[in-house]
Image (cartoon, grey):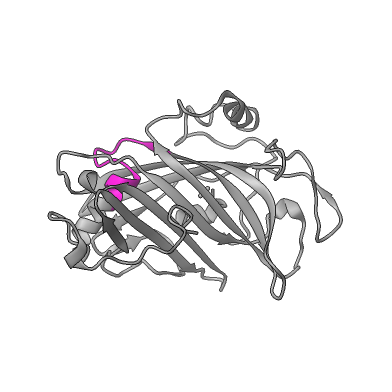
C-alpha cells in the first residue's frame, strides 16, 4: 500500500509482529547454511521469504491503520486501510527483478466499513476518499544492493552490499526490509517491512517459497483526497498480514470493493490500466 512513484522506490502493510524492532543477527546466532553477512544469502533469503525463487507471483494481504503525525501533537488514528501487494522476483543477471503493484481502500475505524466519505478533523471539510492503485513497477535487487532505473535520488539499499537485519530463534526467522529514500526534489520516505518465516524454509535449498507473515510501517504525505494543502504534517501507515500464492483467502466483501473500483485489475495485475477517476497518487513522484 504505497502511493504511485513510491512503489518504484520503496514499499501499497512498525514491528507489530513482535512488539519490538528486529535487530540484525550476528553470524554466530544464524542457522547452519545461512550467513547474514553474505549478500548472496541475503538476496536469496529475501526472495524466498517475500516471493518465490521460481519467479512465481505472490500476494501480500493485510489490514491496518493510518495515523496523523503533526509536530507537537499526539499521533492519532485517522482511518483504517485494507491493502494488497502483488510481488514477484524473477532472476535477472546476478540478482532478481523485483516487481510490485499495490491496491488499497480506506475503512471506518469503528465499523470497518468502506469509507465513502470522511469528516476531516483538521479542515472541518467532508472529503471523498479515493481508493489506491499504483503502477506496476520494478527494480533490480542484487548482492550489490538495489538498482532503480532512472531514479535520481538517494536510497539506503542502493550501491551497497545487501545485508539485511536478520534474527533467528529456533524455527522463527525474522528479517526487515528497510526502504529509506531521499527523492531528487528533496522529499523523503521511509518504510519497513518486517517479515516472519520459518528458519527451516530459509535454509533448505529445496524450498523455493517460504510461508510468511508480515508487519509493515511507513511514512507518507497527506492523502491528496484529504485536501490538506500545505498544512504541515504527514501520515504513518501500519498494517499486518500474510503472504499468499493466490487471492482465494480474500473475502467476497473485500474482493467486491476492488472489482467495483478497478474491475479486472486483480486478474491482470501486470497489464491493467487505470480508468477510474477515483484513484490517488503520491505527491512524492
The segment highlighted magenta reads 46-59
Q: Residue furthest right?
A: 124
For residue 90, side relative to residue 19 (left or right): left
* Residue 276 seen in render: yes
* Residue 136 seen in render: no
The correct choice, above or below, for 229 with respect to 195 in the image is below
Q: Quadrant of residue 37?
A: bottom left
Which of the two residues, 274 or 164, is positioned nearer the viewer here? 164
Q: How many numbered marks have been drawn onto this rendered protein structure? A: 0
Q: Residue furthest bottom?
A: 72
**Residue 20, position in %: x, y?**
44, 62
Which of the two residues, 139 or 32, is positioned nearer the viewer here? 32
Which residue is drawn at the image coordinates 58% and 62% (left, top)? Answer: 284
Q: Quadrant of residue 261?
A: top right
Which residue is drawn at the image coordinates 31% and 66% (left, top)? Answer: 24
For residue 132, side relative to residue 271 (left or right): right
The correct choice, above or below, for 270 with respect to 193 in the image is above
Which of the two residues, 166 or 148, is positioned nearer the viewer here? 166
For residue 260, side relative to residue 248 (left or right): right
Which residue is drawn at the image coordinates 69% and 74% (left, top)? Answer: 71
Q: Quadrant of the C terminus?
A: bottom right
**Residue 11, position in %: x, y?**
47, 54
Which residue is drawn at the image coordinates 46% and 69% (left, top)? Answer: 153
**Residue 219, position in %: x, y?**
57, 62
**Residue 243, position in %: x, y?**
40, 40
Q: Does the segment drawn in magenta span residue 100?
A: no
Q: Does the segment drawn in magenta span residue 51?
A: yes
Q: Residue furthest front?
A: 170
Amino acid at each position: 500500500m504505497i502511493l504511485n512513484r513510491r512503489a518504484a522506490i520503496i514499499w501499497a502493510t512498525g514491528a507489530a509482529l513482535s512488539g519490538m524492532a528486529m535487530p540484525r543477527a550476528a553470524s554466530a546466532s544464524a542457522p547452519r547454511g545461512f550467513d547474514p553477512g553474505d549478500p548472496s544469502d541475503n538476496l536469496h533469503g529475501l526472495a524466498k521469504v517475500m516471493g518465490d525463487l521460481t519467479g512465481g507471483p505472490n500476494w501480500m494481504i493485510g489490514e491496518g491503520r493510518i495515523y496523523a503525525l503533526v509536530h507537537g501533537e499526539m499521533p492519532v488514528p485517522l482511518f483504517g486501510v485494507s491493502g494488497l501487494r502483488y510481488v514477484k522476483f524473477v532472476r535477472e543477471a546476478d540478482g532478481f527483478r523485483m516487481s510490485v503493484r499495490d491496491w488499497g481502500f480506506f475503512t471506518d475505524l469503528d465499523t470497518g466499513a468502506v469509507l465513502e466519505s470522511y469528516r476531516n478533523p483538521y479542515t472541518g471539510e467532508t472529503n471523498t476518499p479515493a481508493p489506491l492503485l499504483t503502477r506496476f513497477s520494478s527494480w533490480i535487487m542484487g548482492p550489490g544492493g538495489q538498482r532503480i532505473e532512472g531514479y535520481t535520488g538517494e536510497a539506503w539499499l542502493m550501491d551497497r552490499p545487501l545485508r539485511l537485519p536478520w534474527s533467528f530463534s529456533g524455527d522463527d526467522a525474522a528479517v526487515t526490509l528497510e526502504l529509506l529514500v531521499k527523492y531528487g526534489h528533496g522529499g523523503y520516505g521511509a518504510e519497513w517491512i518486517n517479515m516472519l518465516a520459518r528458519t527451516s524454509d530459509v535454509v533448505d535449498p529445496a524450498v523455493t517459497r517460504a510461508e510468511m507473515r508480515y508487519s509493515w510501517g511507513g511514512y507518507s504525505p497527506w492523502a491528496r483526497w484529504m485536501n490538506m494543502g500545505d498544512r504541515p504534517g504527514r501520515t504513518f501507515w501500519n498494517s499486518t498480514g500474510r503472504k499468499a500464492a493466490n487471492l482465494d483467502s480474500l473475502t467476497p466483501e473485500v474482493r467486491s470493493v476492488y472489482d467495483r473500483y478497478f474491475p479486472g485489475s486483480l486478474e491482470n495485475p501486470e497489464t491493467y490500466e487505470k480508468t477510474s477517476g477515483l484513484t490517488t497518487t503520491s505527491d512524492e513522484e
